[in-house]
């Protein structure tokens, strides 16, 4: 027995020492083979860290103005269904800020809270400020600068504390938030609906309250099922039959596959259409890579596509047009009516214009027809590009009907229709020219901006939306987005919504892609120089393009998957002539400008 | 209900029985097997050691991991505080956009968190009454425990505080986390590090450790089992060999393998066995020689004895013609010759037994007839001694397969002995029978036997009183032969006696020759003597 134990303990100690030796060897490697790694799959939905405000409940013995201030601060937090903000209200006050609030957006720091009256347990607090715009119930933003003036009534609640006893009527189901609060507490997401021809999808940007990030896929799909916003409703088609609901706990996302279970009403709808809409809508979320569509628990898939759909399957429905994927080359006008195209950063002649240089030229999306304005901008000229390289003959298609009337630069949609607006003396008229047909003037009832001067009109690639620079009576230029409806042969372009109150003056704009405009404008009235900005059509925050400016910028041009081009008079030895500039790094919106070729007013097709 | 209760109770009882049985069995095995004891002890001790080691290791790893995390957290906090200092504290306070600046800083700090969500930030401005600062992502501000807030509020500006807590989130489960915080000029900055990664690592390490420890313990147990087996198996073999040796298989030897301690044991054992065998064979041979010698001597003596006998007979017949003294001598000679002859016969008989040459010539007889015949033979002697032979025979025949000559000799022997030691009192002969056996008891009321003598009476040449002349009485071999006779039948011959109370001899025989005898139909101790202490009652069992 003793011998056994001795032998065993000897073994154990040997084992322990071996383990100890091995442990002493354990260390981090300091050399070795180079191994290739795959990019880390981002399955976590924390693609975009964000910041949330932490609300505070009302403090003890706060004055009425403190209560209102606290309420306004706390209502910026969507946590727990505005639970904290509700503590500022008397119990009987009715307030429904969820789930679709209407939001009054005021300018940062412009709000003033004034106690106007206090008497025996009743108080009135006046809140004034500058409104920038509103977010409607359906999430549609509308820029609407005006002044805010709301009145809050307060009363003493339990334990002799001031509480809000009556909310202003505009706030009974809404919120009063600063732009900063909106930026923080809302996400702008696109819902995708089909253009009337069912070919391309049209993004419908909405503001979604920032809830739990995990619920976002369900939230966005529910918004999609609710349909387009009122503004866009008549111009697009929704593949989801009315009454379709999201079943179960919402959208389940596992390993990049989002499973959407729709109620049985969806069976009547077009599976392919619904899939395309869902795919495009959900692909905005980093965690969604594939889509599985279920109707009443049963997997459904459109013909030709497996049960697990990828964004590639619906590439044809790209809002940027079918060509959205391929880079585009810009055109330049050279001396003597020469038309150049920028191939490999070098102007290559493609055609010659008979009548010499055009002002504000544009080329149709199929690159076959060129249009432009005459010297005085009072007539629109147009001609088919000669493929053989001979001179292209241009002829006048529209002349100004009104005295002093000027046209906007022609814009083309993907049906080959040319659009231009004649403005004169605070009024405007829309002209369209369908391919191979004479131009027609759209009736005033079908033109939503007839009461304004229009500086520029650009049709989006989807052909459903149009961006316009509108100059009102006070010569204040504003960007507006309108919708285009086609009812048989009658075309209406109506309800142009202002999307940004931040730019005070706008000179030019171009569609960067389906979601953003590249705009040449001014942020403050005091600065003389026009600078390029990118303006989301959703109404979100605008941002600058490029670091500073290369010089005095004369025009801006943009296209999907193509660099933003500006023409600028660059200070230096050749300051008289314009040069074409683009960003050194197209991905980095704040990189330096690189003026790489001489020329002015570059333009992309469209 | 009642039936159910009963069923449950029965089950419980059965379970208890099974458990107890299992326990008893395992305890028995535990007692019996060194190997099991060693393996179990090794298992227990190594399990304890490994568990202690594992817990210690786990603690060390956890500590190292958390320390590293804590250091990284402190560096992060330092950096964050730098940003706060630069962007918030050192600029002149501007009441209108204080919150804006705070949010900018929070945005700035959050952006460094990266896509993997390494940490969450909570920044608050203690001077802002209307908000409680900003948190990143879904983090709830309740994640920062009150105790940490208090420490940070009371502590020196810039002095970092840390604690562990649960990070609460909107919409998903809380996770354990490390929370560090500090204050700078009215601003409080907290970094919250989820420890899920660490938890996963620790769980992984723990699982690995448990696996390794279990493997180690099992390995040690297996080692102990193998080692003890190497020791125990030779010991078992030695025990078996010793057992067989004890059973008389003297040629049994152990295998000697190698040169270790166990080989030494085997060699010694084998030496011992060889010696024993040698001695025993020697002794056997010796006794064989002696028996042969006795037998030979007896035979050899017979021929001269016959001659002497003829001469002595002549002298005896003509003793009247001799002088009275010579005549007396002739008579004496005759007597002693008779005695010598019977001694010689007995010696021959017993040497036949010793040589194993005695055979049983069994046939079915009525034992009562044998008794009557023996009684008839001894009646004369009894009369001479003044004893009366009283017979107690059963009414029905007592048939048994016996060698009647031998049984008669036994009975005669017993009766003669009884008459000789009966001191003239009555001698009772009892015959009894049951299904398997027949018994004959011979009871006298003479001097009886002293304690211990009941066994010795069957020894060869034993005498109750050594002082008594050898000239009288039997040869001293009668009872020994009788016992051998009885044994040849598979029966018993037993004696009981008490000083002054007389003695009883009992012969028990199986009814079928060669059958095993389980009991006797007659008690060994006569019924009248039951009250007296019976120190030799166990002899019956002993036979």
Image (spheres, coloured by chain):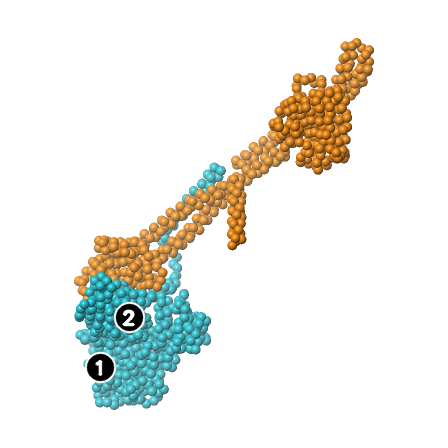
Chain colours: A cyan, B orange
Residue A525: image tag: none
Vertical relation: A183 (above or below) B399: below
Crowding at mark 2 (Cα within 10 Å: few <14, some 14-19, many 20+): some
The picture quadrant where one finds residue A139 is bottom left
The picture quadrant where one finds residue B325 is top right
Q: Pointer 1 indicates a residue of which chain?
A: A
Query: How far, Cα to Cα, is label 1 from label 2?
Result: 40 Å
Helix, strand or loop under label 1: loop
Q: Nearer the viewer, residue B471 or B381?
A: B381
Q: Nearer the viewer, residue B36 or A358?
A: B36
Vertical relation: A382 (above or below) B115: below
In the picture of the structure, the residue carrying the numbered disc 2 is A94
- Is residue B410 visible from the viewing direction of this image? no
Vertical relation: B430 (above or below) A248: above
- Is residue B140 visible from the viewing direction of this image? yes
Crowding at mark 1 (Cα within 10 Å: few <14, some 14-19, many 20+): some
Helix, strand or loop under label 2: loop
- Residue at image location 82% in from the left, 11% down from the top: B321
- Residue at image location 71% in from the left, 24% down from the top: B426
In the picture of the structure, the residue carrying the numbered disc 1 is A472
Position of A379 with respect to B514 (left or right) is left
- Residue at image location 36% in from the left, 50% down from the top: B61
Vertical relation: B180 (above or below) B385: below
């Amino acid at each position: 027995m003793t011998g056994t134990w001795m032998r065993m303990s000897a073994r154990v100690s040997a084992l322990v020492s071996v383990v100890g030796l091995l442990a002493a060897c354990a260390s981090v490697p300091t050399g070795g083979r180079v191994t290739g790694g795959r990019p880390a799959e981002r399955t976590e939905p924390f693609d975009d860290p964000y910041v949330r405000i932490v609300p505070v409940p009302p403090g003890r013995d706060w004055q009425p103005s403190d209560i209102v201030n606290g309420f306004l601060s706390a209502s910026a937090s969507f946590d727990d269904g505005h639970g904290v903000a509700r503590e500022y209200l008397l119990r009987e006050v009715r307030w429904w800020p969820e789930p679709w609030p209407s939001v009054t957006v005021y300018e940062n720091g412009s709000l003033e809270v004034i106690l106007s009256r206090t008497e025996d347990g009743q108080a009135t607090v006046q809140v004034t400020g500058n409104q920038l715009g509103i977010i409607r119930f359906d999430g549609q933003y509308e820029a609407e600068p005006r002044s805010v003036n709301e009145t809050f009534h307060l009363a003493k609640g339990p334990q002799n504390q001031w509480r809000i006893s009556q909310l202003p009527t505009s706030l009974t189901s809404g919120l009063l938030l600063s732009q900063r609060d909106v930026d923080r507490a809302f996400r702008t997401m696109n819902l995708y609906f089909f253009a009337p021809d069912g070919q391309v999808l049209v993004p419908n940007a909405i503001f979604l309250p920032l809830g739990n990030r995990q619920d976002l896929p369900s939230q966005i799909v529910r918004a999609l099922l609710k349909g387009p916003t009122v503004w866009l409703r008549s111009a697009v088609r929704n593949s989801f039959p009315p009454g379709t609901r999201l079943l179960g706990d919402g959208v389940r996302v596992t390993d990049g596959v989002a499973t959407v279970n729709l109620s049985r009403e969806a069976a009547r709808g077009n599976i392919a259409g619904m899939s395309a809409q869902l795919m495009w809508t959900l692909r905005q979320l980093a965690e969604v890579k594939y889509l599985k569509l279920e109707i009443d628990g049963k997997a459904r898939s459109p013909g030709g596509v497996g049960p697990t759909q990828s964004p590639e399957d619906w590439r044809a429905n790209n809002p940027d047009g079918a060509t959205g994927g391929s880079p585009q080359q810009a055109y330049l006008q050279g001396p003597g009516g020469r038309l150049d195209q920028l191939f490999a950063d070098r102007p290559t002649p493609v055609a010659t214009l008979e009548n010499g240089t055009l002002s504000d030229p544009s080329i149709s999306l199929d690159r076959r027809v060129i249009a432009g304005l005459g010297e005085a901008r009072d007539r629109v000229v147009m001609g088919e590009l000669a493929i053989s390289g001979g001179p292209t003959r241009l002829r006048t298609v529209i002349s100004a009907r009104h005295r002093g009337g000027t046209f906007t630069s022609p814009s083309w949609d993907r049906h080959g229709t040319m659009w231009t607006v004649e403005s004169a003396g605070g009024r405007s008229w829309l002209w369209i020219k369908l391919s191979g047909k004479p131009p027609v003037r759209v009736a005033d009832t079908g033109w939503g901006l007839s009461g304004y001067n229009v500086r520029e009109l650009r049709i989006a690639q989807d052909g459903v939306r149009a961006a316009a620079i509108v100059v009102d009576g006070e010569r204040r230029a504003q960007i507006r987005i309108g919708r285009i409806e086609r009812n048989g042969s009658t075309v209406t372009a109506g309800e142009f919504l202002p999307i940004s109150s931040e730019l005070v003056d706008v000179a030019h704009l171009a569609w960067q892609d389906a979601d953003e405009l590249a705009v040449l404008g001014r942020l403050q009235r005091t600065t003389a120089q026009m600078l390029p900005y990118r303006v989301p059509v959703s109404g979100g925050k605008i941002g600058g393009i490029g670091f500073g400016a290369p010089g005095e910028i004369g025009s801006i041009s943009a296209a999907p998957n193509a660099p933003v081009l500006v023409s600028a008079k660059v200070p230096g030895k050749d300051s008289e002539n314009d040069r074409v500039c683009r960003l050194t790094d197209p991905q980095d919106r704040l990189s330096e400008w690189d003026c790489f070729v001489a020329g002015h007013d570059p333009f992309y097709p469209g | 209900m009642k039936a159910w209760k009963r069923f449950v109770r029965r089950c419980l009882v059965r379970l208890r029985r099974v458990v107890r049985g299992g326990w008893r069995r395992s305890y028995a095995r535990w007692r019996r097997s060194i190997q099991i004891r060693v393996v179990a002890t090794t298992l227990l001790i190594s399990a304890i050691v490994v568990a202690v080691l594992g817990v210690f290791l786990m603690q060390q790893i956890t500590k190292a991991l958390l320390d590293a995390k804590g250091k990284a957290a402190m560096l992060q906090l330092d950096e964050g505080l730098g940003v706060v200092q630069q962007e918030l504290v050192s600029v002149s306070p501007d009441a209108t956009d204080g919150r804006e600046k705070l949010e900018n800083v929070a945005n700035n700090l959050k952006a460094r968190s990266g896509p993997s969500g390494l940490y969450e930030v909570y920044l608050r401005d203690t001077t802002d009454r209307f908000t409680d600062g900003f948190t990143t992502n879904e983090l709830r501000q309740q994640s920062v425990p009150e105790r940490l807030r208090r420490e940070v509020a009371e502590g020196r500006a810039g002095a970092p505080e840390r604690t562990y807590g649960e990070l609460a989130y909107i919409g998903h489960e809380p996770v354990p986390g490390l929370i560090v915080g500090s204050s700078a000029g009215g601003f409080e900055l907290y970094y919250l590090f989820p420890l899920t990664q660490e938890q996963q690592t620790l769980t992984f390490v723990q699982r690995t450790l448990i696996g390794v420890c279990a493997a180690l313990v099992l390995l040690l147990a297996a080692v102990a089992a193998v080692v003890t087996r190497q020791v125990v198996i030779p010991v078992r073999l030695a025990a078996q060999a010793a057992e067989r040796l004890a059973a008389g298989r003297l040629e049994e030897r152990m295998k000697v393998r190698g040169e270790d301690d166990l080989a030494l044991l085997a060699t010694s054992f084998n030496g011992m066995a060889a010696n024993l065998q040698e001695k025993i064979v020697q002794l056997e041979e010796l006794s064989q020689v002696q028996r042969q010698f006795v037998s030979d001597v007896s035979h050899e003596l017979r021929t001269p004895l016959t001659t002497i006998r003829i001469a002595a007979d002549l002298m005896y017949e003509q003793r009247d013609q001799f002088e009275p003294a010579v005549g007396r001598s002739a008579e004496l000679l005759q007597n002693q010759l008779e005695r010598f002859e019977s001694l010689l016969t007995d010696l021959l008989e017993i040497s036949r037994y010793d040589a194993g040459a005695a055979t049983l010539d069994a046939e079915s007889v009525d034992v009562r007839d044998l008794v009557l015949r023996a009684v008839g033979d001894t009646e004369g002697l009894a009369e001479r001694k003044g004893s009366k032979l009283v017979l107690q025979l059963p009414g029905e025949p007592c048939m048994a397969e016996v060698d009647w000559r031998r049984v008669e000799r036994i009975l005669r022997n017993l009766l003669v002995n009884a008459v000789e030691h009966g001191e003239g009192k009555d001698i009772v002969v009892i015959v009894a029978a049951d299904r398997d056996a027949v018994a004959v008891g011979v009871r006298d009321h003479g001097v009886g036997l002293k304690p211990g003598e009941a066994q010795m009476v069957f020894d060869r040449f034993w005498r109750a009183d050594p002082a008594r002349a050898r000239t009288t009485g039997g040869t001293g071999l009668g009872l020994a032969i009788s016992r051998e006779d009885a044994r040849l039948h598979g029966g018993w011959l037993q004696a009981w006696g008490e000083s002054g109370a007389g003695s009883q001899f009992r012969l028990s025989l199986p009814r079928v020759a060669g059958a095993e005898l389980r009991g006797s139909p007659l008690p060994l101790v006569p019924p009248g003597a039951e009250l007296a202490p019976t120190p030799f009652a166990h002899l019956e069992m002993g036979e």
